[in-house]
Amino acid sequence: MSAAAIARVGPQGRALPGGWRWVRLREICGPDRQIVAAQDPRVKALPYLSLEHIEAATGRILKAPGSTEEQARSTTFAFDRRHVLYGKLRPYLNKVALPPFAGRCTTELIPLLPGDQVDRAFLSWVLRRRETVEAAMRDRTGSRMPRASLEELLRLEVPLPPLPEQRRIVAVLDEHMGVIEKGRAAAHAQLEAARALPGAYLRQVFSSSEADQWPKRRLGEIAEIVSGITLGRRLGERPARLVPYLSVANVKDGRLDLSDVYETRATEDEIHQLRLQYGDLLLTEGGDPDKLGRGTFWEAQLPLCLHQNHIFRVRCDPNQFSHRFLAAQVSSAYGKRYFLAHGKQTTGIATINRRVLAGLPVMAPSLAIQDSVVEALQSKLEESEKLRWQLEDRMQLVEQLPPALLREAFSGGL
């Protein structure tokens, strides 16, 4: 249908093709809250869907029909193949699903029942539009767990073509979105492969037969290991000044995030003892088990900086040991296996202490070999980093395609 046809100006001064009209969402659909209580006999017969079972943006249902192992202990809503399920919690996730089966869902999912003048699949695409998501998030950006106001959302004006045109648009969108999804999956797989390259390079070095022949020394024998400054301690009458410090949040695996660096009061003695120097290896003492002992080295990004007490500072003599070689070794599978085997784990959080860290058997070939390994690794890691950036840019371009396609569809451009 030509966009040059007779049009009526709607919200934001937008015009529609002839035959289209602006309607409020409440005119074409409404919430259908059929309660299924925990004691209802239907509980065992109806598969249960929560928000986590619906993929963001695509609306793909990630749980197979017929799964009834989750017995809801609270009120749920019944739905069937007539409904569109709309996720009102954190609406920016854009969770809108078309269930192909009857079931029950969390009350954070609202079953919307389309009216006679709107195609069910067309309604789902209307709800997935960026304009609808923005309307649902309006005045809710300050909340950590925002919920869409259904009453406000249903007041939103949306473009509505005749039913035959709706069905044509749905067919075109389904086809194009399918192609985009295949492209997204391929780009994601390439990006994940690129992200895995650094670990693969490290394994090639530190799990090689050559590395097996290198002598080993305990980390505590070749380095000074110091925990950082304790926050909130009492200074008494001692003179102190504000200085920046690194928190655990600043120390990532293989890099530092200095976008938000805080300050603390420290005495001159503390500054002298804990001031970071170029090449200091920084390792966190705790976190998720797979990230235990994460860290990187300090490159003097700030002229003066300390570190908090949940971060270990490891300082080697640069004439005896390469800090880059040590950092690569610690972040490799070899180092992670050691920390995982010797760390203390409680309630999903793992920690290492100074004794464990000092006991790490460090591969200690000659300094010439260390420098040679670092030079070869650095070249490969830089190449993989460039590849990762390129693939992340490509992924961003792919992610921009669905909103652009929906804008075209709802302006009569398809």
Image (tube, rainbow, N blue to C red):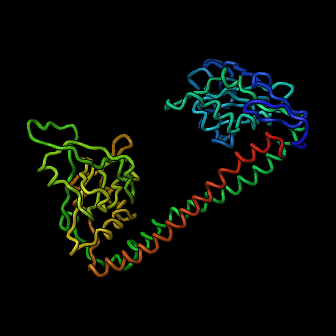
Quarter of the figure with residue 28: top right
Front-most of residues 68 and 176: 176
Q: Is residue 362 above or below residue 303?
A: below
Residue pictured at 32% horizontal, 60% vertical: 338
Q: Is residue 217 above or below residue 262?
A: below
Query: Which quadrant holds the N terminus?
Result: top right
In percent of width and height, residue 258 lies at 37, 52
Q: Left or right? Give the position of 106 relative to 261.
A: right
Quarter of the figure with residue 8: top right
Total marks placed: 0
Residue pictured at 44% horizontal, 75% vertical: 379
In percent of width and height, residue 268 lies at 12, 49
Q: Is residue 48 visible?
A: no
In percent of width and height, residue 156 lies at 71, 26
Front-most of residues 298 and 292: 298
Front-most of residues 136 and 337: 136
Q: Left or right? Give the position of 350 relative to 53.
A: left
Q: Left or right? Give the position of 323 relative to 275.
A: right
